[in-house]
Image (cartoon, coloured by chain):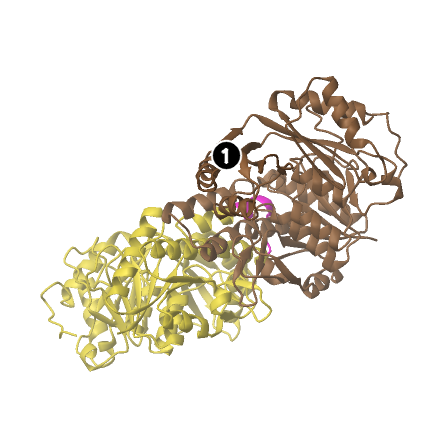
Chain colours: A brown, B yellow
Amino acid sequence: MSLIVQKYGGTSVGDIERIKRVAMRVVTAKSEGHELVVVVSAMAGETDRLLSLAGQVSTAPDERELDVILATGEQISIGLLSLAIQQYGHKARSFTGGQVRIQTDTAHTKAKILSIEVDRVRLALREGAIAIVAGFQGVTSEEEVTTLGRGGSDLTAVAMAAALKADVCEILTDVDGVYTADPNVVPEARKLARVSYDEMLEMASLGAKVLQSRAVEYAKNYSVPVHVRSSFNASQGTLVVREDAEMEKVAVSGIAYSKNEAKITVLRVADRPGIAAKLFGRVAEANIVVDMIVQNISQDGTTDISFTVPKPDYPKAVQIVSGVAKEIGAPQVVGDDKIAKVSIVGVGMRTHSGVAAKMFEALAREKINIMMISTSEIKVSCVIDAKYAELAVRVLHDVFGLAEGTVVEEPL
Amino acid sequence: MSLIVQKYGGTSVGDIERIKRVAMRVVTAKSEGHELVVVVSAMAGETDRLLSLAGQVSTAPDERELDVILATGEQISIGLLSLAIQQYGHKARSFTGGQVRIQTDTAHTKAKILSIEVDRVRLALREGAIAIVAGFQGVTSEEEVTTLGRGGSDLTAVAMAAALKADVCEILTDVDGVYTADPNVVPEARKLARVSYDEMLEMASLGAKVLQSRAVEYAKNYSVPVHVRSSFNASQGTLVVREDAEMEKVAVSGIAYSKNEAKITVLRVADRPGIAAKLFGRVAEANIVVDMIVQNISQDGTTDISFTVPKPDYPKAVQIVSGVAKEIGAPQVVGDDKIAKVSIVGVGMRTHSGVAAKMFEALAREKINIMMISTSEIKVSCVIDAKYAELAVRVLHDVFGLAEGTVVEEPL
């Protein structure tokens, strides 16, 4: 008998029929003899409906009140799912974040989990009930309702699994696992049986949005085995686990890409201390998140600084940067929002040499110019012209032998 | 400076525009220097929407889960009203039943309030905020969400007013007070400046559904002055208060009527102990509420028992009663669902003699036959043929001098 935490997103509980289907799936797992804790999101569209109501009464809604309103979405879901499970003749008991109790800090709309008490949930399990927990929400020490930010239900699921020392945290979603590349771009992309937390983090932050990054980090910190699988079928998905020797045998496990960024370059910046701090400080003040930053060695006392920002922030960022450039005496700012970031990810990179070179050669062979390069321990990212994105992904997928049948992984 | 508790029902917060109007009214009262605690219901239609969702997943929804779902309706209202008030530049702070904290027993969907802690609400008031409290809901000692039953928001408002020792509890509604009779039936009906708790109770239970009976009882027990007034205009409504000498000068303060009942008579029941208990026990088992019961002295060892039930329960009640009649050897059961109950209500009855006789004479003059009579200390009710209901109300309104200008009440 295992203790399993399952998480279903808003699409999976989007209407009454889907809630019944989730209930059936939960009941099936329970009937196989497992103990079950089920984390659910608000029904698809509900959070947006509530945000819209709030937006109609207030131009800048107070975040405390916004959380009071938003938390109702998940509260309805847990009640309905409990009822649906009971209708199938099983015991079920719903828990709001406050009832569990999932204690957070006071940062409304983006609260951090501080601690989880699971006594009440454990009691429900001991009584043979399936525990249904509201995702996305918590409560402060002062009984204030908080929410964890978009995608927060993933975090709730992983944190519950950690607190309960569950055997696995299943993330039931609309894809059936993590692939070596986007199957829409690379038809022969292969579903990975396992990836490491770090690989998953790099893939998530690189646009493969299967799992919220904060949830992966939490899973890594508490060694929670996460199973990403389809909510529509029973097939095995991808296990996200601690890396092991087996994983390191493969240099590259996946190719990720993103077209959601734009790049800005400040030309001939004076190479003096404090200049970069001033530039990025001003960008940060506008709540714009900078991703890649590249600065090369200086020539003639000046250097070029390039960086990428999310595409929606591009116009605002150019405006800010142009202002700063004037102040610091940089003569020119150039930008480009028709770029793509293509990345190879793999824990094996640490022990395999020549991986980056192999990537650059492959792109060069296709005459794809590399505009920026950024690397981490287990990732190499190149910024290229957006029109070559899909080509680059296919070429790299091929070069690193990721296609079905190319690499034989050991069975789990 | 007064401490005022205001209660707005679902219709008053039925859409965004109405919520803004309520916010404006609350802010106006606050600007006049009062401290305000505002109790709100779910937006009109929301409770029914949630009940429908629950009904779609479950044929007999578990009441604990139903309460978890239903409580979200008021939670959305308090958040939205707080935001709307903040938008007008005032401080506002929402409170769920649990946050207040309104502690109830564990009778889900019809919980009773056990105690109210108001420290957090008082703190908000001291900080200059308007406190917005979710009506209809509470929490058990085990942090379970409970609801107080239909119309429970009235009870929340009165209970908050009692706990806070508020100067007045204003019930803002779609009628502008309590009238001597239904103005649709009696055009010259007069708005009462004041009624006693007991009169209000009799009127409420007699079909004048301005205020939930439990709320009136609570107000009476804690001597909370209740002001029933319109949410659409600022005119004075009706004060529900402890009775005084002034009120007793008037024998009859209002005429109530109801067409929502049906009557059943069991003929020639053996006049033996235990027979009535058996009959009404069986009816109660079916959760049918019996209102009037009339049994006259026996003749030849048998008697006739008549009683009224809510009209929707009439067919079921007849079926049950026919079964019991057979068991106890009563030869016949007759019924009638085309009846009306017309009542005169007034605390002055206690000290005025001949009030009932005056009523019977007035009806007789109009050739209206009286089928059943039932009296309490401050009320006389007659069951008559439904078609005479409006005529009877008008005649009684006239006979007891209730029309505008007939009776001059002392100013408050």
Q: Is residue B55 magenta?
A: yes
For the residue marked with disc 1, what is the amino acid? Tyr
Q: Residue furthest top?
A: A366
Q: Secondary structure at mark 1?
A: helix
Q: How many marks?
A: 1
The image quarter in which residue B362 lies: bottom left
Q: Is residue A273 left or right of residue A379?
A: left
Q: Quadrant of the C terminus of chain B?
A: bottom left
Q: Quadrant of the N terminus of chain B?
A: bottom left
Q: Is residue A154 left or right of residue A2?
A: left
Q: Is residue B339 magenta?
A: no
Q: Chain of mark 1?
A: A
Q: Position of residue A293 (x, y in %)?
A: 61, 39
Q: Is residue A165 left or right of residue B259?
A: right
Q: Is residue A90 visible?
A: no
Residue at the image point whose x is 62% and y is 28% from the top: A340
Q: Which residues are magenta?
A: B53-62
Front residue of this view, candidates A142 and B196 = A142
Q: Position of residue B203 (x, y in %)?
A: 30, 66
Q: Residue under circle 1?
A: A314
Q: Is residue A326 visible?
A: yes
